[in-house]
Amino acid sequence: MPWKKGQSGNPKGSPKTSLVSIIRAKLSEEVELKDGKKTTIAEAVIQSLFKQAVKGDMKAINTLLERIDGKVVEKIEQDFKVNGMKFIDNEGNVIDE
């Protein structure tokens, strides 16, 4: 069924909340731990991640390190030649044919 000229195909518009905002709100909610202490869900998740890392879980260790220092960037070098063109490598050297 086509719409009339000037009529929106989505009259209610897009949702007012995003998945990210829902997750952030949930992470800030307070929960009670088994020992009776109260904390946020975010803090409980982080504590769980640390416990896994201390036990030697490499995935947990990598997750923590990536959150602190960022993911390791792998440098890829490639040799190539194109007739009549010059290129500059990462160190600023001109690469000739």
Image (spheres, rainbow, N blue to C red):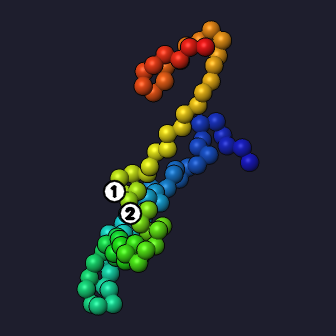
Q: Label 2: few (<14), some or many (≥20) within 10 Å? A: some
- Residue 64's tag is 2
For the point 43% across and 51% down, which residue is it?
71
What is the x, y in percent for residue 56?
43, 74
Name the spot of residue 58 as percent of width and height, x first.
47, 68
Identify the secondary structure beneath mark 1. helix
Q: Label 1: few (<14), some or many (≥20) within 10 Å? A: few
Q: Is residue 41 visible?
A: no
Q: Residue furthest bottom?
A: 35
Q: Quadrant of residue 36?
A: bottom left
Q: Which residue is mark 1?
A: 68
For the point 74% across and 48% down, the residue is 1
State the quadrant of the C terminus.
top right
Do tag 2 and tag 1 residues touch (Cβ < 8 Å)? yes
Q: What is the quadrant of residue 96 in the picture?
A: top right
Q: Is residue 19 above or below residue 37?
A: above
Distance between the alpha carbons at the discs numbered 2 and 1: 6 Å
Outermost residue, right side: 1
Amino acid under disc 1: Ile
Residue in view at x 66 percent, y 40 percent = 4
